[in-house]
Image (spheres, grey):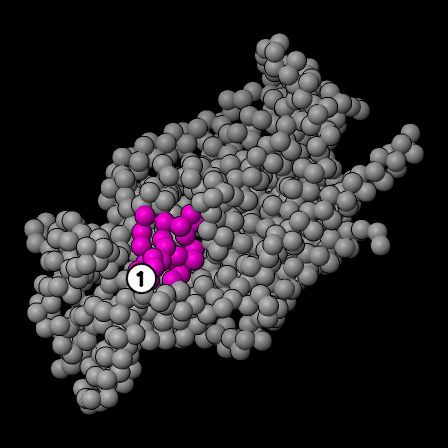
């Protein structure tokens, strides 16, 4: 294999994999039920809360957490932090999985899914619809992500394909793929810039229904900044976990300089968030100490703490603190997006929504599927960097003991 | 000038800035006016006696089943709000000894949020200004329900193959030269149908003739950019009490469409950003590979 990425090998059917599989199977059963009886009996969504966690978590939060590919590509290719290239593949993998499952989640949530093929047809488009732009961008981006990840599959199959034709095909496609790489990488940065900001724009229309602490013309900018923070944090989180689980050498030191960039993005977010409230004379809402001001303050705390901690060099180079900061940044973005789509959304005084158990199980099931797919792919295909031992052949089992030199 | 990452970042910042600050005047969205042949309805709460004949006729005309509402197992039609099976409902407002009825239905906005947000135009405004729904173009995303300031579009939650349901002013009857079913049914002319301009004049005349009888406002004249269904309320009963929120005069799509079109005007910004990204990535990769070769 010609890249420094290696499959980690080891058995597929581990404890984690089997638990995830069990959760996933339950959620599939719930989904069958959902398609037979409709959304009413299976979810807590209602006429006043037509969007529940399947949109808010799986799509609005899920795609932002899957912005690792976007955040790392921005840092690597645009800010030219070349030495982090080995983070790209795992980041693209989680992005591809996260975005694909967001797409699945949308189909599950759509009431009239059988009409969905009409959406990509150009002549049907309502160019005023922000949701349309988001939908088209996300559909395209899913394709872009899998093509960006394709070299990982091709490298494997060129050496060791289950069928000869697959090997020949891989050898044929690979050089062609390298030629379209740059337009593809640029598309992989353009598309999330567009649809992540537009996810925020989607709530602009809810002028009177969204609480004044969250409704602002700044929504697109705040959503764009928050997805970079969340995507980057997800990469730190995932790198730390993968290093631990697969006993890889720690990458934290390599990540530390990137965290400086996050300090800038976090403070930019905070400045826009607070500056906007101040300019529009809405700061008073923060100090009402009602439910909404409490949610706002909680959200703010989760943004401020990592922003301040990561200023200090000794904290950036402390794996424990860095992991904690990543967790806080992910939660901060999650909370901000939940607040902007559900918690701060108040369509009528008597309106209420809390997800039903089956509804939560479906979301959990999709996450479980993502875990299974991630584990399967990194074990078979060259995704993770810094694997110092030679790639063990499938079936040899055991996570390799770090040997000297690759 | 060479393209650097700074250019890209500047471009992104500029795009963000236009999206949030002063949108150039040339891009500002024009206020929409009702179409020339605009029709509408006028509901006068002081004339309504709450007989619900309009609800019965509405269900008949639109072939909707009875909706027992929250009363489980009830066999009669008793929805307590608009639902996936109820396009028109008479509600009662009571506070102390003050009582008023209220007819809830689609407002047929001049500049409707549902039409603005709908991906492939399942919601449209026809040449009379009626906001129509085409299930054939609806994917059931329910963004219309999120967007509508009056919470009018409803969803059939209890079936596998649902539709969005809302009043379409009985456009199938209008096409035959008939009146909307609720107007036809009303024994007190509490709700009337006509040309929008005539209805506006009528409403203003009623206010002028009996100022003591009415709350001094015609709801829908300017609210949310104007609606084609107008309301009169009894003296002392503000419209919020009847479930018609104070949403100002700005049409809801104005903010979202202005911002969106400012950023995506002619698709110029995305194309420029794309080109700049491509150049920067190309340059960075070239520099990096030459550095790597230098290392060897």
- Report the magenta residues as a range: B112-134
Q: Residues within 10 Å of mark 1 (few under 14, many from 20)?
A: some
Asked which quadrant contains residue B7, the reply is bottom right
Task: Tell me the residue at 47%/59% (across/down).
Answer: A203
Q: Which residue is mark 1?
A: B128
Task: Tell me the residue at 27%/35% (across/down).
Answer: A36
Please indicate whether residue A128 sits to the left or right of residue B63 in the image. Answer: right
Q: From this view, report whether residue B293 is shown above or below residue B164.
A: above
Q: Is residue B124 part of the magenta span, yes or no?
A: yes
Please indicate whether residue B289 sits to the left or right of residue B59 in the image. Answer: right
Residue A93 visible in the picture: yes
Please indicate whether residue A68 sits to the left or right of residue B246 in the image. Answer: right
Task: Tell me the residue at 56%/39% (across/down).
Answer: A140
- Residue A2: where, in percent of width, then height? 76, 23
Quadrant the C terminus of chain A occupies: top right
- Residue B285: where, in percent of width, then height? 80, 38
Task: Tell me the residue at 80%/51% (across/down).
Answer: B4
Q: From this view, report whether residue A68 is shown above or below residue A217.
A: above
- Residue B156: where, in percent of width, then height? 26, 48
Asked which quadrant contains residue A302, the reply is bottom right
Residue A314 visible in the picture: no
């Amino acid at each position: 294999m010609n890249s420094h990425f290696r499959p980690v090998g080891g058995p597929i059917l581990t404890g984690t994999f089997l638990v995830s599989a069990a959760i996933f199977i339950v959620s599939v059963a719930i989904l069958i039920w959902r398609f037979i009886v409709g959304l009413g009996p299976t979810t807590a969504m209602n006429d006043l809360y037509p969007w529940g966690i399947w949109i808010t978590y799986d799509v609005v939060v899920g795609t932002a957490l899957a912005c690792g590919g976007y955040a790392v590509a921005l840092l690597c290719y645009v800010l030219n932090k070349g030495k982090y290239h080995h983070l790209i593949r795992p980041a693209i993998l989680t992005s591809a999985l996260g975005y694909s499952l967001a797409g699945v989640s949308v189909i599950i949530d759509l009431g009239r899914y059988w009409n969905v093929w009409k959406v990509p047809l150009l002549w049907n488009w309502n160019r005023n619809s922000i949701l349309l732009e988001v939908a088209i961008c996300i559909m395209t981006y899913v394709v872009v992500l899998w093509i960006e990840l394709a070299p990982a599959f091709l490298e494997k199959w060129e050496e060791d394909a289950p069928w000869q034709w697959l090997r020949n095909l891989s050898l044929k496609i690979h050089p062609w793929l390298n030629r379209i790489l740059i337009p593809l990488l640029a598309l992989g940065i353009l598309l999330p810039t567009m649809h992540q900001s537009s996810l925020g724009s989607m709530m602009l229309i809810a002028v009177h229904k969204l609480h004044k602490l969250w409704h602002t013309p700044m929504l697109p900018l705040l959503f764009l900044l928050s997805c970079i923070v969340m995507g980057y944090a997800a990469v730190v989180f995932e790198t730390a976990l993968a290093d631990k689980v697969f006993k890889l050498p720690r990458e934290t030191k390599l990540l530390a300089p990137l965290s400086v960039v996050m300090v800038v993005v976090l403070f930019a977010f905070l400045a826009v968030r607070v500056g906007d409230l101040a300019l529009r004379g809405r700061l008073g809402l923060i100090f009402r100490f009602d439910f909404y001001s409490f949610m706002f303050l909680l959200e703010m705390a989760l943004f401020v703490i990592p922003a301040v901690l990561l200023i200090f060099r000794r904290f950036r180079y402390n794996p424990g603190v860095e992991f904690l900061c990543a967790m806080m940044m992910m939660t901060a973005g999650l909370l901000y997006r939940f607040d902007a789509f559900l918690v701060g959304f108040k369509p009528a005084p008597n309106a209420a929504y809390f997800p039903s158990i089956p509804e939560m199980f479906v979301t959990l099931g999709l996450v479980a599927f993502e875990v299974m797919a991630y584990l399967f792919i990194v074990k078979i295909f060259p995704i993770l960097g810094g694997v110092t031992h030679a790639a063990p052949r499938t079936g040899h089992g055991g996570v390799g003991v770090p040997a000297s030199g690759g | 000038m060479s393209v650097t990452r700074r250019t890209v970042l500047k471009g992104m910042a500029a795009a963000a800035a236009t999206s949030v600050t002063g949108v150039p005047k040339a891009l500002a969205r024009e206020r929409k006016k009702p179409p020339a042949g605009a029709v509408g309805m006028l509901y006068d709460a002081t004339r309504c006696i709450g007989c619900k004949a309009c609800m019965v006729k509405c269900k008949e005309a639109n072939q909707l089943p009875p909706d027992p509402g929250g009363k489980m197992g009830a066999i009669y039609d008793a929805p307590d709000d608009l639902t996936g099976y109820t396009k028109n409902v008479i509600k009662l407002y009571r506070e102390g000894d003050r009582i008023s009825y209220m007819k809830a239905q689609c407002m047929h906005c001049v500049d409707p949020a549902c039409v603005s947000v709908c991906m492939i135009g399942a919601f449209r405004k026809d040449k009379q200004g009626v906001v129509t729904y085409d299930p054939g173009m609806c994917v059931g995303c329910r963004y219309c329900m999120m967007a509508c300031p009056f919470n009018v579009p409803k969803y059939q939650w209890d079936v596998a193959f649902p539709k969005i349901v809302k009043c379409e002013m009985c456009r199938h009857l209008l096409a035959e030269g008939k009146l909307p079913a609720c107007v036809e049914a009303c024994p007190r002319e509490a709700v009337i149908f006509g040309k929008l301009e005539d209805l506006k004049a009528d409403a203003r005349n009623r206010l002028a003739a009996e100022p003591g009888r009415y709350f001094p406002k015609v709801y829908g004249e300017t609210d949310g950019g104007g609606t084609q269904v107008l309301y009169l309320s009894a003296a002392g009963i503000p419209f919020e009490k009847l479930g018609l929120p104070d949403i100002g005069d700005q049409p809801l799509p104005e903010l979202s469409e202005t911002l969106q079109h400012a950023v995506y005007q002619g698709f110029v910004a995305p194309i420029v950003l794309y080109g700049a990204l491509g150049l920067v990535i190309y340059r960075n990769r070239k520099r990096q590979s030459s550095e790597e070769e230098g290392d060897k």
